[in-house]
Image (tube, rainbow, N blue to C red):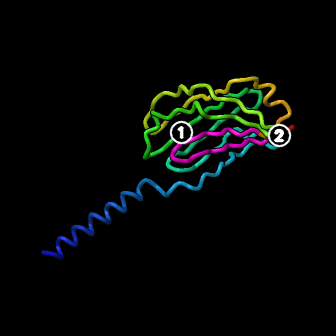
Amino acid sequence: MHATIRLQVATVLIAGALAGCATGPSPAPATPVVSPSPAGATPNILRDHGGDVTVEARWGGPMASATFELTLDTHSVDLDPLDLSDATLRNDRGDMLAAEPWAAPMGGHHRDGALSFQGDAAKFFAGARWIELVLVGVGDVPERVLRWELST
C-alpha cells in the first residue's frame, strides 16, 4: 500500500514538473534585442525579455516624434493594473521627457498601445546620439532600458 501511495505522489510530482515545462524555458536575462534594419537606418523594434514579462517597443524614429507602440506579453502576470505613467525618455545630453498616461486596452496577459511623451520632441531629438526608453516596475524588473542609437 505504501508503494502505491509513493507511486501516486511521484506521478503527481512528475506531472507537475512537466506542466511547468509546458510554458517554455525561463525568460532570458533583461537584454534588449535589436531587430534587423537596413544599413544606416534607426532600428525600430527593441525587445526586452526580463522577469515574467516580454516588452516590445516599436518606434518610427525621430520623424515619428516621441510616440512608441508597446506590446507586453506574459503567461503569469495580470498586466491590466500596469501603469506606465512613470516611464521616461532620455537622451545622451541628459534631457528627459515624461510619459503621458498609457491608455492601452485591458487584456490580462497581453497589452498593446501607444505610449507618448510630453515636451518638445524636436528639441529632444536634435543632435542626440541615442535615446533610451525607461520603464519602471514591469514584471518585477526594477528598471528596463531600451536604447536606440541615432545617426547624427
Crowding at mark 1 (Cα within 10 Å: few <14, some 14-19, many 20+):
many
The residue where tag 2 is placed is 129
Residue 72: numbered disc: 1
- The segment highlighted magenta reads 131-150
| Disc 1 to disc 2: CB gap under 8 Å | no
Nearer to me, 79 or 24: 79
The kind of residue tagged 1 is Leu
Is residue 20 rendered to the left or right of residue 40? left
Principal SS element in the magenta part? strand
- Report which quarter residue 2 is drawn in: bottom left
Q: Position of residue 37 (x, y in %)?
A: 74, 43
**Residue that protrudes farthest toward the left in the picture:** 1
Which comes sooner in the sequence, label 1 or label 2? 1
> What residue is rendered at 55% in x and 45% in y?
54
Is residue 18 rendered to the left or right of residue 68? left
Q: Position of residue 49 (x, y in %)?
A: 57, 49
Q: Position of residue 39 (x, y in %)?
A: 81, 44
Secondary structure found at label 2: loop
The kind of residue tagged 2 is Arg
Query: How far, Cα to Cα, is label 1 from label 2?
Result: 27 Å
